[in-house]
Amino acid sequence: MKNKQQVLQLTVSYIVILAMITIILYPILWIVGSSFNPGNSLSGSSIIPENATLKHYKELFDREQSDYLLWYWNTIKICILTMLFSVSLVSMTAYSFSRFRFIGRKNGLMTFLILQMIPNFAALIAIYALANLTGLLDTHLALILVYTGGAIPMNTYLMKGYLDTIPKELDESARMDGAGNFRIFWQIVMPLAKPMIAVISLFTFITPFTDFILARILLRTEEKFTLAVGLYELIADQFGNEFTLFAAGSVLIAIPISLLFLSLQKYFVSGLTAGGTKG
């Protein structure tokens, strides 16, 4: 009886896993298949195209037909700078909350959590007005600042929880040897926090790739578009929709994200599981 129950549970588990894999992979396979279909419409596309072609990929890399490479460079630049600024600010802020005791510490952490509950698009009018007043409208710097600021609240809470798991005795031993706060932070705490740094790096790198609303509001000229905005323009025209070209561009977006994920994968399990252990 017990063996039958275990077999039933295992069977149900496999069915659920297969169902989830199908739900996840099906749209991805459609996008990949559509990128190899001839023509511009998705109406005649199929997952396995009969007359597969690389024409759409060639068009993306042709500067005379598309600004895709420029959009790609803009996005990569914004992603890298956002990741670097976010990780730096989050690490220092989380270290302060984890290692020091000061007035407003608990209220500050609670404020970070509350701010995280408010989505960025809820402040679109304020963000647009600030960018316009400061002369940052239609600049990549405006996007980098918004993405960096938006990444601080929740990531600080995650990083702080991870730093709390690092024994404070290490700090005290280093301080007895004459090390200052910055040296303890840089040479002792940060090397031990690599798993959480990897998690935050991936999260903040992906955000500019997946965001459309903020980039569409702040960026005005085609030369400064990110991939999300640029690809949208390919299908926004009522009479000139290029869905298959859009599909090819979408497939190539996954390359840098996949490479970063694979390079940091060994840190993810420990980083995600330990980040929320303490408050």
Image (cartoon, rainbow, N blue to C red):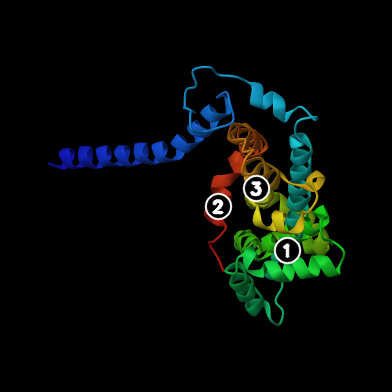
Q: Nearer the viewer, mark 1 or mark 2?
A: 1
Which circle marks residue 206 in the picture? 3
| Residue lying farthest to the front in this orientation | 239
Sequence-wise, the earlier of marks 1 and 2 is: 1
| Residue lying farthest to the top in this orientation | 51
Mark 2 Cα shell of 10 Å, populated few (<14), some (14-19), many (≥20): some
Residue 77 in view here: no
Pinpoint residue 248: horizontal percent, then vertical percent. 62, 31
Sequence-wise, the earlier of marks 3 and 2 is: 3
Residue 221 in view here: yes
Task: Describe residue 137's horizontal placement relative to residue 262 as left or right.
Answer: right
Q: Nearer the viewer, mark 3 or mark 2?
A: 3
| Residue lying farthest to the bottom in this orientation | 103
Mark 1 Cα shell of 10 Å, populated few (<14), some (14-19), many (≥20): some
How far apart in space, not on screen, are marks 1 and 2 (Cα)?
Answer: 21 Å
* Residue that appears at 61% across and 59% down: 162
Mark 3 Cα shell of 10 Å, populated few (<14), some (14-19), many (≥20): many
Task: Describe residue 103's horizontal placement relative to residue 8 as left or right.
Answer: right
Name the amino acid, label 3.
Answer: Ile
Residue indicated by mark 2: 272
